[in-house]
Image (cartoon, rainbow, N blue to C red):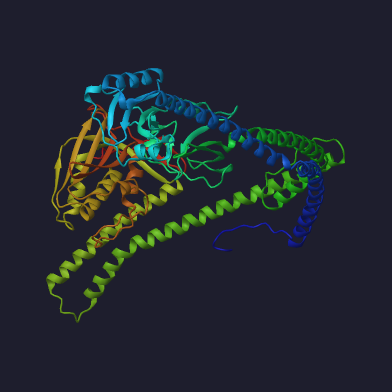
Amino acid sequence: MSTSGAVSVPIEPARVRTRRRKQVGVGKSLRRQFLALLVVIATTPLLVFGVWELQNGHSYGLARDNAVAEQHSASDRAAAVILSRFAEITADLETAARITDPVNLDSSDRAAILGSLLATNRGFRSASFIDAAGRETERISRIVPTSLLELRNLVGSEVFETPIATGRAYFGPISIDATSGMPSMEIAVPFTDHRTGEASGVLLTEVRLKEVWETLGAVGVPGRSVTTYLLDRGGVVLAHPNPSVVLAGTVFRPEIRDGFQSGLRGEDGVVTIEEIDLGSQELFLVTESPKGEVLGPYYRDLTNRLLAIGAAVIFAMGAAFVVARRMAKPVLDLAEAASALSAGEWSQRVNVERDDELGQLGSAFNEMADQITTQIGALEEGNRRLKSTLASKNRFLAAVSHELRTPLTAVVGFADLLRDTDSDLTLSDRHEMVNLIADQGSDLVDIIKDLLVTAQAETGELDVTLVPVNLAAQVAQVLEARHHKDRTSVAMDGSDIRAEGDPSRVRQIIRNLLSNATKYGGETIRIALSQHGTTAHLAVIDNGPGVSEVESDRIFEPFHRIPHGDETHESVGIGLAVSRDLAHLMNGDLTYRRHHNETFFELTLPAAPAPNPSSTTPQTRTITAKPDTRQLVNSTPPNTTGD
């Protein structure tokens, strides 16, 4: 028999391969037919749609051209309105210059003429007369009182030199008021001396372009959000609905005149440009709108068409799927079930919904699968039990060999030295070696007891007899036994604490806890006894470093070793696991905690009632550990109190 304990079911390979090949062939044939049907149904309307789109492919280009034409028409109308407004302002100024001869007027008359000009034109912010020498002779403003205005010398400036030299109106650059964000422009026209016919000065005004601004905001195309702004020849934004764009000195140079391109904000859309010629100033009216809004109607129409075709395709595919599934489902289900059953899925069955030959075949298949499942289940259960038995044996042998190796090695080594008659060992050395052999033998006894407890617990043969136990007396016995091999001083607090437990098992737990504290704890070890209500407590306390939080959850696992810097003490780590199992078996518990830099291993047991003087035989109970449960059995106790 193999040591792995594996049990296998012999199956003829050739027969399995033949059955699978037949099943796959049926599935592929039906799936091919179904796939061909779906391809024909799905591609036919798509081909029809493709032919239709080829015949009507110009619709996208037409929609694009119409969008550009509509926006260009709107911007053309806006440019005409702006030019018309500038023409009106220029005509008003030229009329005032022709009927006025400021050279021969005194200051009050000149001021009255300028005031009348500002009164009849609400868009004028200021006005001034400039004589032939380029000096302002009179100046008034809507914002600054006349008394605070300083007359300027404008010789050499374009606002004076250009209208004098050309005899035509001059349009200055657009500027933005930093406070209101409103654009304005200086416009100058020359006036002549009626007696000589020569230019005798310039009428200069600063005009607010509010109406131009409003014209920009009024440009629109139904169904679109249109942004309109002015650029100069260098691409600098002069007017924009958002004044911060102008104040930031934004520059935009369109790639093409009219059409689809990236706009001022970097978004694709329709951009149209209209030139506004003001003589000395050349402006460009730019309008842009998002591409999504421009082509929205075309996209909506295209989407509706695709949705209609998609719905038709889905409906046709659904109908074909239902029909094909109805035809192929029984055979495919049976093929998949047979394949799954051959792969080891013993619970696989087919759903029989027909009364014809296919239904009879499905029922026969299910009966066959039930018989196979029953036989396989019996084999697997036997295999599981065999594996469990072998695993338990292997774990037990490994634990025994490892636990016994260290003390036996020491005993054999010291015995060989003592047997060597030629060695120069002194009597004191031989006496020390004998004591060491005795100590190792005592350790062997403790290890064997722990291993025996582990083996008995696994097989359900571990019994504990519960009697009233004096915990202080049990501690004293353990300390007395340890005195010969371990001189570590252990202090005990508390006395006359009685608990219900098995005296030998209680001493075994105490030995394990003291051994653990001696090996891995601190220099100071003490035992604290106490009772809280119906629970007796025995705590072994040391001032050692303890263990980490991660390891604290595993210290009670059998055969788990916690790494320590000091590797002089060998242990496989069943002492704490055995101790906790014994505590549980005696209706108690064994816990670990850290408190005030000290390590606490605390045994808790049910407190024993006070002894009854009239009773000579105390009531005891025997508890037997079962593999899966713990059963309480009443028995007649021996005549002992465990004190």
The C terminus - image quarter? top left
Q: Is residue 457 above or below residue 467?
A: below
Q: Residue placed farthest to the bottom in the image? A: 422
Rendered residue at 37%/51% (across/down)? 558
The N terminus - image quarter? bottom right
Q: Residue placed farthest to the front in the image? A: 195
Q: Is residue 27 above or below residue 70?
A: below
Q: Position of residue 606 (x, y in %)?
A: 29, 33
Rendered residue at 66%/39% (across/down)? 65
Q: Residue placed farthest to the right in the image? A: 356
Is residue 433 visible in the rendered structure shown here?
A: yes
Name the residue nearer the viewer: 420 or 369.
369
345 on left or right of 612: right
Is residue 367 visible in the rendered structure shown here?
A: no
Q: Position of residue 63 (x, y in %)?
A: 67, 37
Name the residue nearer the viewer: 312 or 563.
312
How many marks are shown on the rendered structure?
A: 0
Q: Position of residue 236 (x, y in %)?
A: 42, 42
Q: Quadrant of residue 99 in the image?
A: top left
Name the residue nearer the viewer: 375 or 13.
13
Name the residue nearer the viewer: 541 or 201.
201
349 on left or right of 452: right
191 on left or right of 10: left
Q: Is residue 73 above or below residue 545?
A: above
Q: Position of residue 211 (x, y in %)?
A: 45, 25
140 on left or right of 312: left
Rendered residue at 35%/48% (across/down)? 554
